[in-house]
């Protein structure tokens, strides 16, 4: 184990073999899940839903069936969730990935390709724009009927509201919906293609904050491992895919990633 001393904390122990793996890597795929956003305060999908929506099952608010049954409630929930995300800030892990990306890009040393299951924009605000949002993006919109991209004029709620009528598409008059993937829908083809391409061409993969339960994301590490590429898991607890990992580091993203990036690129920015 390698100890990294930080001025405001005790030494962080980093498995030495992580640096052995990443020393010769020039294209690193970073797969992130809900745990990474949760460290910024974003509720995870399985967190209890309080207040106005406490009597709803989560699936009722994020499904095709829920939208058809009550679009006003589904739209109101998504607007409130987007408001909560906007109040959160990128954590130290997001910022570390952004710094790693900037330094490698400036030096011409390699590429960091972020593939995320998260629907928030914390990676973007942290400086490392994902090549793939597997489950869509909550701050992008399209028409439910014709699929046209939309930029509705929105009034973000200061407090949760039980129901808000969705805006209408200026092209066909259909309801505008959030650009996320709901239960009963296929994942965006471009997002899947980009994620698979990254897993199939990377020199190493780092898996952060994902439970390894939801596919096809949970299958991406196996694509990299099947090519003989090393796969590293950073997570405070065991997951459904821990047994497929080459290196396991039991730590949170906000603690592990700054120390890891310091060890790879130094204190450059």
Image (cartoon, rainbow, N blue to C red):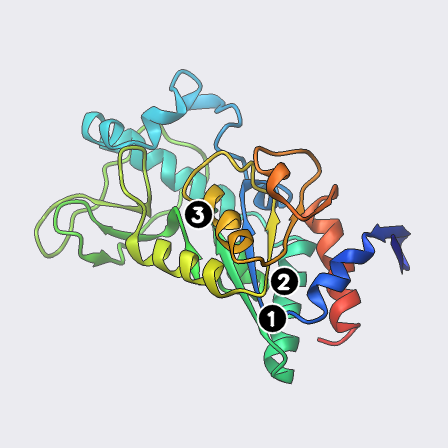
Tag 1 near tag 2, CB within 8 Å:
yes
Rate crowding at label 1 as few (under 14), some (14 to 19) or many (20 or more) other CA atoms within 10 Å.
many
Helix, strand or loop at mark 1: helix
* Percent of width and height locating residue 73: 30, 29
| Residue 25 or residue 151, whichever sits in front | 25
Per the image, the residue denoted by label 1 is 101
Helix, strand or loop at mark 2: helix
Between discs 2 and 3, the one toward the N terminus: 2
Q: Nearer the observer, disc 2 or disc 3?
A: 2
Q: Is residue 262 left or right of residue 73?
A: right
Between discs 1 and 3, the one toward the N terminus: 1
Residue 56: quadrant of the picture:
top left
Q: Is residue 133 left or right of residue 68?
A: right
Q: Which mark is residue 119?
A: 3
| Image quarter (top left, top right, bottom left or bottom right) of the C terminus | bottom right
Residue 266: quadrant of the picture:
bottom right
Q: Which mark is residue 97?
A: 2
Distance from Cα at disc 2 to Cα at disc 3: 17 Å
Distance from Cα at disc 1 to Cα at disc 2: 6 Å
| Residue 240 or residue 58, whichever sits in front | 240
* Percent of width and height locating residue 6: 88, 59
Rate crowding at label 3 as few (under 14), some (14 to 19) or many (20 or more) other CA atoms within 10 Å.
many
* Percent of width and height locating residue 182: 32, 37
| Residue 171 or residue 97, whichever sits in front | 97
Q: Is residue 154 left or right of residue 246?
A: left
Query: At 34% from the left edge and 35% from the top edge, which residue is drawn?
Result: 76
Query: At 65% from the left edge and 84% from the top edge, which residue is drawn?
Result: 107
Distance from Cα at disc 1 to Cα at disc 3: 20 Å
Q: Is residue 19 left or right of residue 241?
A: right
């Amino acid at each position: 184990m390698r100890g990294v001393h930080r001025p405001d904390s005790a030494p962080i122990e980093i498995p030495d073999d992580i640096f052995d793996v990443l020393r010769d890597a020039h294209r690193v795929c970073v797969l992130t899940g809900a745990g990474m956003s949760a460290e910024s305060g974003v509720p995870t999908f399985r967190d209890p839903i309080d207040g106005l929506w406490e009597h709803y099952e989560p699936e009722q608010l994020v499904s095709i069936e829920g939208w058809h049954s009550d679009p006003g409630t589904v739209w109101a929930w998504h607007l409130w969730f987007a408001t909560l995300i906007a109040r959160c800030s990128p954590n130290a892990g997001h910022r570390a990935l952004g710094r790693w990306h900037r330094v490698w890009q400036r030096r011409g040393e390699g590429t960091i390709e972020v593939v995320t299951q998260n629907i928030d924009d914390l990676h973007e605000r942290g400086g490392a724009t994902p090549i793939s949002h597997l489950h869509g993006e909550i701050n992008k919109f399209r028409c439910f009927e014709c699929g046209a991209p939309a930029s509705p004029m929105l009034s973000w709620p200061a407090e949760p509201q039980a129901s808000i009528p969705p805006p209408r598409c200026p092209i066909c008059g259909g309801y505008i919906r959030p650009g996320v993937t709901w239960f009963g829908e296929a994942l965006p083809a471009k997002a899947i293609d980009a994620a698979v391409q990254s897993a199939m061409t990377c020199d190493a993969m780092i898996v952060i904050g994902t439970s390894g339960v939801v596919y096809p994301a949970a299958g991406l590490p196996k694509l990299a491992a099947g090519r003989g590429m090393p796969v590293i898991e950073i997570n405070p607890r065991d997951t459904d895919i821990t047994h497929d990992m080459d290196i396991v580091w039991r730590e949170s993203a906000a603690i592990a990633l700054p120390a890891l990036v310091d060890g790879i690129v130094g204190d450059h920015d």
